[in-house]
Image (cartoon, helix red, strand yellow):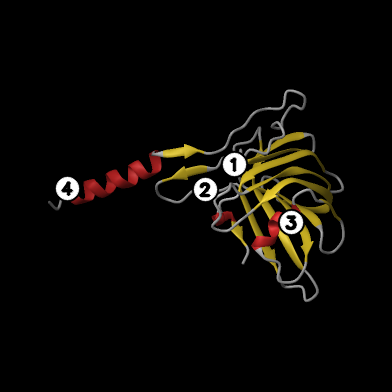
Amino acid sequence: MRILFPIAVMFMVFTSFTCSKNLTDYYPDPATNGVAIFSDQGFNLMTCLLDNQGWKTRDRYSYAFPPTSFEVNLSTDNSDPIADTLHIRWFGALTNSNGNSDEVELVLPVHKSFKAVELSGLQGQRIELKGPAGYVNVVIASSGQRLRGTGRVYFNRFHFEQGGVSQNLMAGLFDADLGTIKIKSGRFDHELDARVVNIP
């Protein structure tokens, strides 16, 4: 019995890591090399051209244990006394690299005490990311670069309902000017699992 117990535990751990499912669907855009087609079906990815090189979020995997690994995170910052900010952060890397430690982040100004139930109100909005409460951040892990600049985002679809029965989705387009580096052809399409929305 003492021998069987650790074997059973090892088997459970092994199967939990090996029984995984890739929840990301990537369909390359035949017209723009390095990015995915624009979609709004919950394909769970963001792609763009970062300095004319393809950049893609890491794949979303569902595991029995540990929990699902996500490619996107939404949160708010209420440290400013005048306005809050909404942060949409993606994790990934250039498609020709092996890493997943880069970050691309959109920061949008929102009113104080912004709630998750208000995210759906962003659908159809075109927002300029320009100013102290609106900007784009990029972290390139391989070179240690941390860049900030201006940008634009369009939310083609945005639906989030806590405990709702319909599919929660965020999809849209963006670009950014980081000075020496530009982001072009940015497009994102995510099913919004409640675990990626860290907003009250």
Q: State left or right for residue 63 relative to residue 106.
A: left
Question: Which quarter of the picture shows residue 79?
Answer: bottom right
Q: Are marks 3 and 4 in contact (CB under 8 Å)?
A: no
- Circle nearer the viewer, 1 or 3: 3
Q: Of callouts 4 and 2, which one flags the residue occurring earlier in the amino acid sequence?
A: 4
Circle 1 — which element? loop
Q: State left or right for residue 23 relative to residue 172.
A: left
Q: Of callouts 1 and 3, which one flags the residue occurring earlier in the amino acid sequence?
A: 1
Q: State left or right for residue 148 relative to residue 38.
A: right
Q: Of callouts 3 and 2, which one flags the residue occurring earlier in the amino acid sequence?
A: 2
Compared with residue 150, is residue 171 higher up or lower down, i.e. above or below?
above
Q: Amino acid at mark 4?
A: Leu
Q: Of callouts 2 and 1, which one flags the residue occurring earlier in the amino acid sequence?
A: 1
Q: Which residue is mark 1?
A: 58
Distance between the alpha carbons at the discs numbered 3 and 4:
55 Å
Residue 87 placement (x, y as % from top left): 71, 58
Residue 184 placement (x, y as % from top left): 81, 38
Q: Which residue is mark 4?
A: 4
Is residue 140 visible in the rendered structure shown here? no
Distance between the alpha carbons at the discs numbered 4 and 2:
31 Å
- Circle nearer the viewer, 3 or 4: 3
Residue 69 shows which numbered tag?
2
Residue 200 placement (x, y as % from top left): 61, 67
The residue at 58%/48% (across/down) is 166
Q: Of callouts 3 and 4, which one flags the residue occurring earlier in the amino acid sequence?
A: 4
Q: Which residue is mark 3?
A: 121
Circle 2 — which element? loop
Q: Amino acid at mark 1?
A: Arg
Q: Of callouts 4 and 1, which one flags the residue occurring earlier in the amino acid sequence?
A: 4
Nearer to us in this view, 105 or 155:
155
